[in-house]
Structure formats: structure tokens, C-alpha cells
Amino acid sequence: MTSSVSAMLTSLRRTFDEGLTRPLEWRREELRSVQRMLREGEDELLEALHADLGKPAAEARLTDLSLVAAEIDVMLRNLGRWSRPERVHMPAMQQPGHASVIREPLGVALVISPWNYPVQLLVLPMAAAIGAGNCVVAKPSELAPRTSAAIARLATRYLDGRAVAVVEGGVAETQELLGQPFDTIFYTGNGRVGRIVMEAAARHLTPVTLELGGKSPTIVDADTDIAVAARRIAWGKFMNAGQTCVAPDYVLVHRAAADELVDALRTSVRAFYGEDPRRSPDYGRIVNDHHFDRLHGLLASTEATPAVGGGSDRAQRYIAPTILTGVGPADAVMDDEIFGPILPVLEVDDLDAAVRFVGQRPKPLALYVFSRSKESVEKVLAGTSSGGVGVNCTVVQLAIPGLPFGGVGPSGMGSYHGRHGFETFSHRRAVLSKPTTPDLPVQYPPYTAAKEWLLKKLL
Ligand code: NAD
């Protein structure tokens, strides 16, 4: 393996050095090929996503395929503008001259992705890297094996093999890749592996983007439309059976609205998935036995009672959409990111208590707040930090290409989507260009009193 990985990298580096990926025309053509791959490979990908995660086709189209296609549309429309040199101000002392920032590709990028949105989280960063003019090695997750195989097959068919490679495999293969001197590494997954990636990158001083997770809180004020809040929370939480990095992890609800919210969540779950969500074609499954057992263990160890759901079936890796009430901060479900269809609801006395609760914990990837009051929303924004925020919505903030998508602190570093992805895979190179005349002697030694006087005046 080692020799084949380093041979692959040598070949990609040669492609990069020869300049194949730099012209905008190549980038555009390759991005169009990615779109064709998603369009013509749709059936194959939908089938694989269903086999790996029980993803309903409509949901998979929305979250894995259309989102990427829409992002690539934005890239195609804006690539020319984004890659144009950006002129910057010249201070009087440095006149005449011309200063600008040019974007250049970093080189060969490594993209490592997880299993939960295995198309989106691999292909979108790949596209951003291509759009910025890089060669890419993409490593899909072994925990979504059917999707990994489908993407590898399709990439060979549709993408330019001189510049883009998909390498399948698990921990060993990823570690092998991480031993290589890439020019940038873009990793999406959990923080434990994020640390491994960063350590490996440090050996080559390779910059990293880490898209991690965390416990994303949802604050529900008493002054809000509870029915709408419940629908949007239940939708964001239970899509992909809760295996979404920006899913609401837990709810902090004003005590006065708690009962109404739990009732409305129950109504929403029933409206979405029927009396028995196991039979709903719109409800997904847990990715593997390990994660099923982890979630089942959480349900067994929590002291809270399920107000909704609570059932499971290991043979199907099914865990019912579950709402837990009477949860305290010390409960097992409040330790780590749940990453499954279990939603603890905690009651708080007021908004200040909710803000304090969030502020005392690690900065999450997303934070949601439901309130009619602008003041309350401002209070939450000012008193907390998170990668992104949804006000009166969940999850959909990541469908806005203009918004940077990424974490802060333990939920990650760096961002992508829209222009932010282009920037992540580009080097901002400072270029100052000056004419050879005039060449005033004032800046050169010896620094006489007259020159010093003049310099003081000029600076
Ligand atoms: P995962 O197990 O598929 O791992 C992600 C990648 O890391 C895989 O490609 C895998 O091969 C590789 N990997 C795993 N162990 C490794 C090791 N020891 N050394 C080197 N490489 C290794 O996915 P996961 O980490 O279970 O994904 C879930 C986590 O990802 C959650 O915490 C979730 O919040 C987070 N996530 C974040 C985002 C985001 O955009 N910020 C998106 C999705 C998921």
C-alpha cells in the first residue's frame, strides 16, 4: 500500500506542478463533471445511501445530492469573480505601486469524510478543492461501505483521474494517507480523530480544516410559536435518525412552555412518521451495531423517562424517535454528543439560565433559538458562541452558500460552503508591484538628519 499511495501522490503532484488544474476552464469542466456524476449516478447513489443508512430517497436527494449540486452552481457562477486579484489600498509612503491579493491553489488536498451524509460531506469539499484549482485525494468513510464503493466507481468514470483520486479504506488506509505530505487536509468527523489528523498534519506543517461535532443546544423561549418550533426541532433532530452533525442535541425550554412543547413534539413525530415509525419509509436506521449499542446503552442508563418513543430493535438497527423529559444536567445523555434519535428536554427558569447553561459547556457546532423577541435572540447571541446559529429554524443554515459552515473551538476550525470553501482551499498571496522609477534615496542609509526629518513627516 505505502508504495502505491506515495506513487499516487507523486503522480497528482506532477499533475499539479504541470499546471493542469490551474486554468479556470479546467476547473469549470471538472465541476460540471461532478454535477454530471451526481445526476447520472443518482440511482446508484440513492440505492447505496438506502442500503447504508435506510435513507429515504427524498431526504437523500435533498441533503446529499441537491445541496451539493446547488453549491456547485454557485461555484460555477462565481469562480471568475472569486479568483480575480483583489486590489488593496497603497499607503502614501509606498506610492507609486500596486498591491493586490491573488488566490492560488494550495496543491494536493486530502479530504476525509464521515458516514452520516457520505455523499455531501465528501463531494462538497472535493468540489471546493477543485474549484480552487487543486488536485484532490478523497477518502470516503468505510462505515458507509456501499456509498463509498459507489462514489469510487463513479469518480473513475466521470472525473479526471490525473487530478482526482478516491481512495477507499478504513483506519489503516487513512493513517497511511495521513503519513503523506499533503498541502492541506480537510477532515470531517469526530474530535478524537480530529486530534489524530492534526497531529499527523503537524509533522509536515500541513494546514488543516476540521469539521467536527458537539452537543448543539436548542433554546426555546416561552414567547414563541410552539407548534412551529416543535415541527422544526423534530424535523432537524429525526432526519437521518438523528445522525446529523448539526441536529439539535438537546432542548432547553422555558419552564412555562415545557409541557406544551413536549405535546407538540409528540404531535410532530406522529405527523411525520405515523403511529409506528418503524414502518415509515421516511425514517432512517442507525448506521451499524456499534452505534446502535451505544445509543441503546444511553437509553438504558438515562434516568429520564421517554415522553415519546424509547423503543428499539437491534435486528433492524431501529431506534424510535425519542423525547426524554425530566432530564438533569448530570444525566448520561448530557455527557457526549448523542448523534442519534434521542432528544433530551431540560427545563430552565428563564433565558439567562439557558444562556449560562450553554456558555458553561464546550462551544457547539450549531445553536438554535426559538423566540419572537429580538431582544431574547440578541441575548442568546451575545452570551454564547457556536459555529453557526439558526433563529427559529434548525439545520437549514447550512443550505445557505453565503454562510460559512464550520465550528469553533472543540467543534472545529476553518469553514467551507460558497466562497468560504474556495478560500479554504486557496492561498491568499500578497503581491506588491512597484515601478523602478522614482527610486527616492530617502529610504536608504545613511540616515542623515534631513532624511530622518522627512521620514517622520511621511510616516
Ligand atoms: P467516521 O467513523 O466515518 O470517521 C470519519 C473518517 O475518519 C473516516 O473516513 C474514517 O476512516 C476516519 N478515521 C476513523 N478513525 C480513524 C483513525 N483512528 N485514524 C485515522 N482516520 C480515522 O465518522 P465519525 O467520526 O463517527 O462521524 C461522526 C462525527 O462527525 C460526529 O461527531 C459528528 O458531529 C461529526 N460530523 C461533523 C460534521 C461537520 O460538518 N462539522 C459533519 C458530519 C459529522
Image (spheres, grey):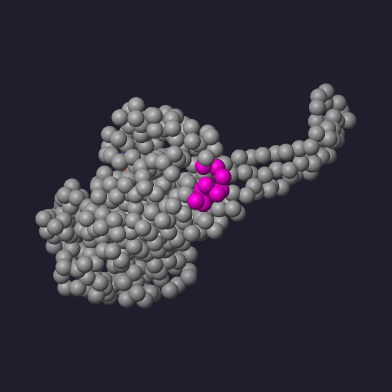
Q: Can you say whether 351 is above or below 160 in the image? A: below
Does the magenta stretch mainly form a helix, a strand or a loop?
helix
The answer to whether one can see residue 61 in this image is: yes
Q: Residue at x 23, y 53 (%)?
A: 52
- Ligand 1: quadrant of the figure: top left
Give the tally of numbered discs: 0
Q: Which residues are magenta?
A: 21-29
**In the image shown, does 432 or 14 lie closer to the viewer?**
14
Q: Residue at x 36, y 47 (%)?
A: 157
**In the image shown, does 82 or 311 lie closer to the viewer?**
82
Residue 120 lies within the magenta run: no
Give how far across and how far down residue 17 sits, in percent: 53, 33
Looking at the image, which residue sits at the far top?
Answer: 446
Q: Can you say whether 386 is above or below 95 in the image? A: below
Could you tell whether 244 is left or right of 449 in the image?
Answer: left
Could you tell whether 70 is left or right of 290 in the image?
Answer: right
Could you tell whether 69 is left or right of 247 in the image?
Answer: right
Give how far across and how far down residue 280 sits, in percent: 19, 68
Q: Where the C terminus falls, by quadrant?
A: top right
Q: Residue at x 42, y 52 (%)?
A: 34
Residue 315 occupies which quadrant of the picture? bottom left
Residue 209 occupies which quadrant of the picture? top left
Looking at the image, which residue sits at the far right?
Answer: 450
**In the image shown, does 187 or 329 lie closer to the viewer?**
187
Q: Residue at x 43, y 61 (%)?
A: 399
Q: Where the N terminus falls, by quadrant?
A: top left
